[in-house]
Image: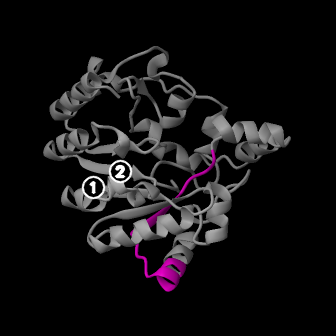
Amino acid sequence: MDGETARRIGGWIEEHRPSVVDITGGAPELSEHFRFLVETARASGSHVMDRNNLTIIETPAFQWLPEYLAAHQVEVVASLPCYLEENVDAQRGEGVFDRSIRALKKLNAVGYGTTLPLNLVYNPLGPKLPPSQAELEADYKTELQARYGILFTGLFTITNQPIARFAEDLRSHGQWDDYLELLANSFNPATVENLMCRSTLSVGWRGELYDCDFNQMLNLPAAGKPTFLWEIVPGQLDGQAIQTGVHCLACAAGCGSSCTGTLS
């Protein structure tokens, strides 16, 4: 994101004061405008969330992050696909689990998991639906505290979307049709009212609007045409059609899936 785009987004936040500003990446902290967006949103009364990959905290250039995030009362949402080292390293790379645990301890040390919100994210390995969020959260809390003394607020379980690298992997293993059939057969109408695309705007690095992060990855712009955040006011979006595709089945399958976990 360049400086002009960041300033325009910051101006929109100041004017319209969204209840939540959820900053994601990649690793969003790498942006030179990360602190500007955090501080602008907090000054505007927004609750700020940082989608943090944990390992960045273990790099020398970003050791300031825990104290900074705590000082601005930013909610940390961090991906940890398992509480077992071998499973995380198999999915994310050798040494990722150990660095993640060290980062979580540093977040705990400044109040995350007790006085500040620290939520972890789980998504299943392979073409299956996540287990019960409540039951898995209980397991995570028991294991992480017993093994490492780590505390956290909650666990978000997120269904794998049949897009990007996961879609390529499904096709290469001949599992595409089976996974789409699983999602379709698991459709849960109770999830529809709370789907994140109904209340959340996804803003791209150039400021363009999408109905969700997954549509952004698929280049499906909101309203079916390129629109930038600063070109709209919130009321213009009332009743606007949401761009959909087969990937949307993942958000409505089973207990549902959103950026804050299950829906029903």
Furthest residue toward bottom? 146
Furthest residue toward front? 60
Foreground: 69 or 178?
69
Foreground: 20 or 172?
172
Residue 113 in sight in this render? no
The residue beneath circle 2 is 50
The residue at the point 35 percent across, 69 percent down is: 106
SS class, disc 2: strand
Magenta residues, start to end: 143-160
- Dividing the picture into quadrants, the one containing residue 149 is bottom left
Q: Is residue 249 above or below residue 134?
A: above
Crowding near the residue tagged with mark 1, few <14, some 14–19, many ≥20 C-alpha atoms within 10 Å: many
Q: CA distance from mark 1 to mark 2?
A: 7 Å
The residue at the point 18 percent across, 45 percent down is: 39
Q: Is residue 169 left or right of residue 65?
A: right
Residue type beneath disc 1: Val
The residue beneath circle 1 is 74
Q: Quadrant of the N terminus?
A: top left
Q: Is residue 133 above or below residue 22?
A: below
Disc number placed over residue 38 in the picture, else none: none
Q: Residue 152 colored magenta?
A: yes
The residue at the point 29 percent across, 41 percent down is: 34
